[in-house]
Image (tube, helix red, strand yellow):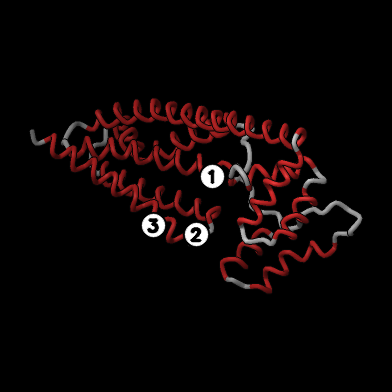
């Protein structure tokens, strides 16, 4: 059903979309309504994975291109690359954790305030919600009906107010998971540009390390972009090329900077 709904959207096929949603018609009116179309899961961590992986590869590949541009020894690539990989990976993970936790604290405080207002000033909140819907172009009478219906369930009422009034879509209860995803994505993808140099250093190989690093980095940048397309509903080719071009631009800048300093 997930794949069918996704394909229906990409193809703009209304009939296929109806088939993906047809399970709703089998839900009895006396039963709680459960949305039959199960949307893709895992999207809550895709931002951390994509940004962590992209930043990891660009960071370490920029180290590689900068060192090569400066015409320094391959051993320096390994030293700077590994230290940058670990240090920046930890910094990225901690930064993601702190940012997510701070956002959660703010969102929880706002929700507590909304719950208090709904409980202690329901009429004021109703008027506020009516005005919000009227601002969206809904007639006053319809806005009142929607508001009175939502007000029958305090939790749903607060959920809607969080989105409509404050623009807060939800609360991430596991910032530590975001941090872990960021760290492993950063180190896993960030390892690719320096892996040829690590192997070459261990096996005493010195030829063609940079071309191999370019090929591996380009390939994994494209793979990362294609993976992102599975959740962003972009064309996989467009998403892969977009990620590849962004990474290439950053690497080219580092190479040119390395060349400029290496000539001095």
Horizontal arrangement in the rendering, residue 179 relative to residue 212 (left or right): right
**Circle nearer the N terminus (3, 2):** 2
Regarding mark 3 in the picture, which secondary structure is present there? helix
Residue 212 placement (x, y as % from top left):
30, 46
The residue wearing badge 2 is: 234
Label number found at residue 46: 1
Regarding mark 2 in the picture, which secondary structure is present there? loop
Horizontal arrangement in the rendering, residue 143 relative to residue 180 (left or right): right
Horizontal arrangement in the rendering, residue 50 relative to residue 107 (left or right): left
**Measuring 75% from the left and 44% from the top, which residue is drawn there?**
156
Camera-nearest residue between 129 and 34:
129
Residue 117 placement (x, y as % from top left):
71, 34
Cα–Cα span, label 2 and label 1: 14 Å
**Measuring 82% from the left and 46% from the top, which residue is drawn there?**
152
**Circle nearer the N terminus (2, 1):** 1
Cα–Cα span, label 1 and label 3: 18 Å
**Measuring 34% from the left and 37% from the top, which residue is drawn there?**
59
Horizontal arrangement in the rendering, residue 199 relative to residue 118 (left or right): left
Regarding mark 1 in the picture, which secondary structure is present there? helix
The residue wearing badge 3 is: 241
Camera-nearest residue between 250 and 83:
250
Camera-nearest residue between 158 and 76:
158
**Measuring 79% from the left and 50% from the top, which residue is drawn there?**
148
Mark 2 Cα-neighbour bin, 10 Å: few <14, some 14–19, many ≥20:
some
């Amino acid at each position: 059903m997930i794949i069918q709904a996704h394909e229906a959207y990409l193809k703009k096929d209304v009939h296929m979309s109806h088939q993906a949603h047809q399970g709703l018609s089998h839900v009895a009116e006396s039963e709680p309504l459960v949305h039959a179309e199960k949307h893709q899961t895992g999207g809550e961590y895709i931002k951390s994975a994509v940004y962590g992986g992209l930043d990891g590869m660009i960071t370490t590949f920029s180290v590689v291109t900068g060192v090569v541009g400066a015409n320094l020894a391959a051993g320096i690539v390994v030293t700077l690359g590994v230290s940058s990989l670990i240090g920046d990976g930890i910094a990225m993970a901690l930064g993601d954790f702190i940012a997510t936790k701070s956002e959660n604290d703010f969102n929880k405080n706002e929700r507590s305030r909304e719950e208090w207002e709904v409980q202690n000033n329901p009429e004021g909140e109703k008027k506020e919600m009516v005005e919000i819907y009227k601002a969206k172009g809904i007639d006053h009478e319809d806005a009142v009906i929607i508001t009175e219906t939502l007000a029958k369930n305090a939790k749903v009422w607060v959920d809607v107010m969080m989105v409509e009034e404050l623009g807060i879509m939800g609360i991430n209860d596991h910032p530590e998971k975001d941090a872990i995803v960021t760290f492993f994505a950063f180190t896993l993808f960030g390892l690719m540009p320096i892996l040829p140099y690590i192997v070459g250093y261990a096996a005493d190989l010195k030829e063609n390390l940079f071309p191999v690093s370019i090929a591996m980095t380009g390939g994994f940048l494209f793979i990362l972009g294609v993976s992102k397309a599975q959740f962003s509903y972009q064309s996989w080719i467009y998403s892969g090329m977009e990620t590849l071009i962004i990474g290439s631009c950053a690497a080219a800048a580092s190479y040119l900077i390395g060349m400029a300093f290496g000539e001095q």
